[in-house]
Amino acid sequence: MKTSTGVALGLAAAFGLLSALHVTWALGGKLASGSVIPVVDGTPALRPSAGTTLAVAGLLAAAALVVLVRAGELLPSFPPRLATFATVVLGAILVLRAVGDFRLVGFFKTVRGTAIAHWDSVLYSPIALGLGLAALWLASTARQR
C-alpha cells in the first residue's frame, strides 16, 4: 500500500468516526457531549440544532469521500485538479480551526478555565491540526491510480 493511500484511509476513518459522533449527538446521544460546546460565563456560546449537527455530520462524511477521491481510491475518473483543490480547502479549514477564533477555540483562545477550553487545548485543536496537515500533505502527493 502506498503511503498516500494509507494516509487517505486513516483520514477517511477519522472523518467517518467524527461524522458518526455528530449523528449520535443529533439523535440525542450524550456520548462525550459535555465538553464540546464553548461556554462563556457559564452559558453555552451556541446551541446547535439537530439539523445543524446533522449538517456537520454530512460535511465530515463528505471530507472522508474527498480524501479517498484524492488518493484515487474512489471515483478514479473524478477530475484530479478538483480533488486536489477540495483536499487543500479541507486541510486549510482544519488548520484554521486549530489556530482558532482567538477567543473560544483553537490554540490561541483567550477564554480558558472551562472544560471545553481544556479539551480543546489537549485534544480538539491538536486533532484538527493533525487532520489538516495530513490533508494538505495528501493534496501535495501524486494522485494514485
Image: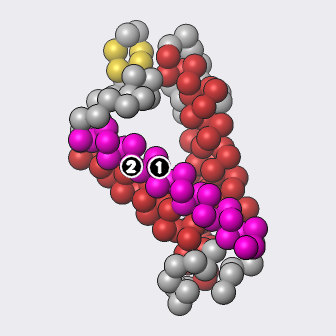
* 19 sits left or right of 72 in the view: left
Q: Is residue 58 above or below residue 108?
A: below
Question: What x and y, as percent, mark residue 53?
Answer: 31, 44
The stretch in magenta equals 1-27
Q: Is residue 109 above or below residue 114?
A: below
* 35 sits left or right of 140 in the view: left
Q: CA distance from mark 2 to mark 1?
A: 5 Å
Provide the residue designation for mark 2. Answer: 20
**Element marked by disc 2:** helix
What count of labels does the image hold?
A: 2
Q: Verify CB contact (< 8 Å) between mark 2 and mark 1.
A: yes
Whether residue 130 can be seen here:
yes
Provide the residue designation for mark 1. Answer: 17
Q: Residues within 10 Å of mark 1 (few under 14, many from 20)?
A: some
Q: Main secondary structure of the magenta part?
A: helix
Q: The disc labelled 2 sits on which kind of residue? A: Ala
Question: What x and y, as percent, mark residue 100?
Answer: 58, 35
Q: Please say whether residue 96 is one of the residues in the magenta stretch.
A: no
* 59 sits left or right of 3 in the view: left
Q: Quadrant of the C terminus?
A: bottom right
Whether residue 56 can be seen here:
no
